[in-house]
Image: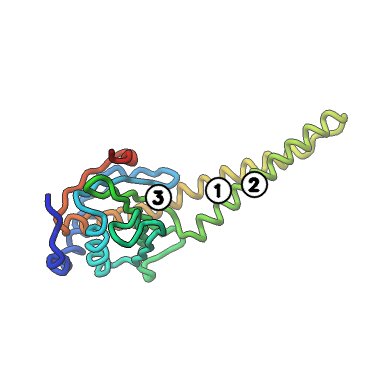
Amino acid sequence: MDCASPESFASGSGALLDRAAARSISGHAGARGMSLGFRPTFHLEVTCASREVRKCLRERLAEAPVVLGVTQVPGGGGGGDLSRDHFTLSIAESERHFWSPWLNLELVPHGSGTQLSGRFSPHPSVWTGFMFAYLALSVLAFFALVFAAALSMSGGAPWTLGLAGLCVAAMILLWWASQVGQRLAQAQMEELRSILDCALEECGWALQEHAAPLTEAA
């Protein structure tokens, strides 16, 4: 299918919200494999050059009820398509809560088309906090086990085993909290995915979803 013309970018934007809402009600996004992974991902192939995809998405998503951020990753060169672009979609601030998802999109040229790789995650500060907590607990548990082994070899009571157990329990609790958070954010994840799909389809391009990133085109 041919790329949509620049003149068509401004038309039909009002129908985007209605179509996204209809998909959310019908469970369309859930049918596209929105499983609850640690950081749910998906990969789309679009039959158009990355520069046109980027332009169309900026036009369409600017009028959607989301907060849109666009970053041009260095190294692409100014003459042709950029090597990759980074988009972030998030829920409007009036509807945002602690577990609200952020959708990170990477646009990468692939042959004559474009690959879109999407990854859901919580707010960057929430994600950073979780990762720091996991790292701190892992290091503390490691040293507690090492100290317990040293105490046992010297004939002492390995009392730090209890501390290591508490660290493991805290890590399990953090994992459980992340799963609960993803379930609380599921509806908003489906909303963001529906808005993205509708924006791409409004541009008039064929979409194909893949289970893994595409290999480099020959």
- Determine whether the residue tagged by mark 1 lies in a helix, strand or loop: helix
Find residue 183 and report its horizontal and vertical position in percent: 40, 50
Of the image marks 2 and 3, the number of the one nearer the N terminus: 2
Find residue 6 and report its horizontal and vertical position in percent: 15, 65
Label 3: how many Cα within 10 Å (few below 14, some 14–19, many 20+): some
Find residue 200 and report its horizontal and vertical position in percent: 21, 56
According to the picture, the residue beneath numbered tag 2 turns out to be 137
Q: Amino acid at mark 3?
A: Arg
> Can I make out residue 101 in this image?
no
The alpha-carbon separation of the residues under discs 1 and 2 comes to 10 Å
Marker disc for residue 174: 1
Q: Is residue 51 left or right of residue 125?
A: left
Question: Is the Cβ of the residue at disc 1 closer than 8 Å to that at disc 2?
Answer: yes
Q: Amino acid at mark 2?
A: Leu
- Determine whether the residue tagged by mark 3 lies in a helix, strand or loop: helix
Of the image marks 1 and 2, the number of the one nearer the N terminus: 2
Q: Is residue 210 left or right of residue 184?
A: left
Answer with the quarter of the image where residue 10 lies: bottom left
- Determine whether the residue tagged by mark 2 lies in a helix, strand or loop: helix
Q: Residue at x 59, y 52 (%)?
A: 132
Q: Is residue 23 left or right of residue 96?
A: left
